[in-house]
Amino acid sequence: WGGVVVENHRDGIWRGRDWGYLIMLYILLHVIRTLLFVSTYPITARIGLHTNWPETIFQIYGGLRGAVGIALAIALDNEVYEVTEGDDTTKYEQWTTEVYEMVGGIALLTLIINGTTAGPMLKWLGLVDSSETREKMIEAYKIHFRSEQIDAFVELLSYTRFRNVDFGLVKFHVPYLADLTLLQLTEAVEKLKDSTPPDKYRPPQIDRVVPYLVDKNDPAAEEIQERLNKAVFKETKDQVARSRKIEERKKKRALRRERRNSSTLKFMMTGEPFSTKEMRLLFISMVRAAYEHQINEGELESQHILAVALEQSLEQAEADVQGGKPLDDFQYLQRLHHSGKQLTGWIKSHTRAFCCRAKWGKLNRVNYLNQKLENAYVEQAMAFTSAHKRAQFLFQEQLGGLHSDLSEAGKVVMAESQAQVDMALKDLDEKVNKQVVRLAVSHKFCKILLNKGIQYIERLVGHGLLKESEAEEIVEELEHLLEHVISCNESSHEGEMDISIVEVGGDGEDHDLRASTLHINAEDGHQAEDTIQESPAEVASSEPIHLDTVPES
């Protein structure tokens, strides 16, 4: 626009007085806009979102001119150019040029004047919070976000499958826990214990966390350790037994009172009981719902290849059951893993042959692929066993009731499911190295924490507590950390400590940590007390934890 004005000023088309006309036009447009908004205010104040005077004033002031006006002026100029056959000496061409200059001038003035002063105008009218207020709110939410991460961290530690998580690795990948203190850990454990019924409380496994946090130079460290000991210390067996008896009596009374109008599937069924085939299909639906629960909890990603494989295994199982075969969705996952191993072996053999001829050291990529395959297999086993355990509990609850047995068809389905869970754990124990399992479980732990963090920020946005623009930076940081966890190929991480913790069972013998790592219960708060067996380490956890555990020399 400046070039057009300079050229036309030189040719005499744009004169000095045209600047005055431009300013007058700028003022006149605001007057016209004011008349339009004021005349329609009685209507806009009563319909829709019910505007007010400050908003109306800003609507008048914030009407920037630009793209549409300039586009129309260019279109007019082109039309006149065609009619006049490019003769710029005609009065029509000069008038069109002046119109184009005025439109461009208005766009320039509204952009420079109205655009740059819109922010202060909004603050002056009281339509936005000050930037300082928003920054304070964001900082407050960041502090609360870190508190949520600590609570989620402690809750996950109460799950048996995460007993042997490496806290050094977690600190490396989740920086929000890097400066965790013993007092913060204690408060989070106390919060978990206070919010959980006594008979369902599962003490978090903090043996591998405390050595990172103990500061022997802190005079209050001993007192904090005593608090933590009491928080982790599980209730005595007598206390738990009393609590269970009370709960059992309540359940019996509720069962007698609501038997006729019970909402469980068992009491809603009429006619012939479900056949074994129908029971299997129902159980598959429950497993599918358990996978959806894991996605909602941030343990699975809906579009990840692992979630897709698990869904496909259920579809294959449904097809087999429809054909009269037993429940066996794990065989599909076994075949998938076997195919991956074969492919990796083929790539490795051919790459090795190529490297020998070309002296090209690319075997690390094959080893990386093989490690990722093993990690995926561990995560798959965790998701599979957890989903089946959750489905088993709901299956027993809905079709067996509190104090009654399942039908023969139901028992068959439960036995088939448990056989698959046992097969998955045995398969993993025989095919995957212990260190690979520990690393895979620890990385999975980090991914769940970060996914929970993203879900928390999205909830704040959904409730209107954070703006999308404010949450975008935090979510991007979390996604970057998540990508770093997924791509991590390191077996050791900065800041890790070599902590020696030997699990000793009731028989006085050491137990393989792989089995305890993946011994999965219905860990969503619906523990099936009568059907789920506690591991030896859980029985031992009723004793006070020794918090003076030190690294090996």
Image (spheres, rainbow, N blue to C red):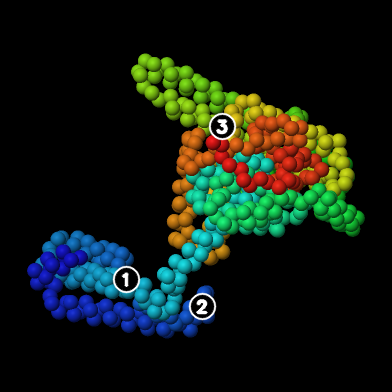
**Residue density around tag 2, few if under 14, some if 14–19, many if 20 or more, within 10 Å:** few
Q: Position of residue 549 (x, y in %)?
A: 61, 43
Point out the image quarter for the C terminus.
top right
Q: What amino acid is at disc 1?
A: Gly
Q: Is residue 65 left or right of residue 499?
A: left
Q: Which mark is residue 115?
A: 1
Side (left or right) of 163 relative to 217: right
Amino acid carrying label 3: it is: Val
In this rendering, is residue 132 above or below 501?
A: below
Please state if 395 lies on the left or on the right of 145 as rendered: right
Give the mark nearest the N terminus, 1 or 3: 1
Circle 3 sits in a helix, a strand or a loop, which is it? helix
Disc 1 versus disc 2: distance between alpha carbons?
25 Å
- Quarter of the image for residue 249 reads bottom right
Q: Which residue is mark 3?
A: 436
First of labels 2, 3 by sequence position = 2
**Secondary structure at numbered mark 1:** helix
Which is closer to the viewer, label 1 or label 2? 1
Q: Residue at x 41, y 79 (%)?
A: 125
Nearer the observer: mark 2 or 3; the answer is 3
Residue at 78% across / 45% down in the picture? 528
- Which residue sits at x=51%, y=28%? 370
Q: Which residue is mark 2?
A: 50
Against 301, is 257 above or below?
below
Distance Cα–Cα, label 1 vs label 3: 58 Å
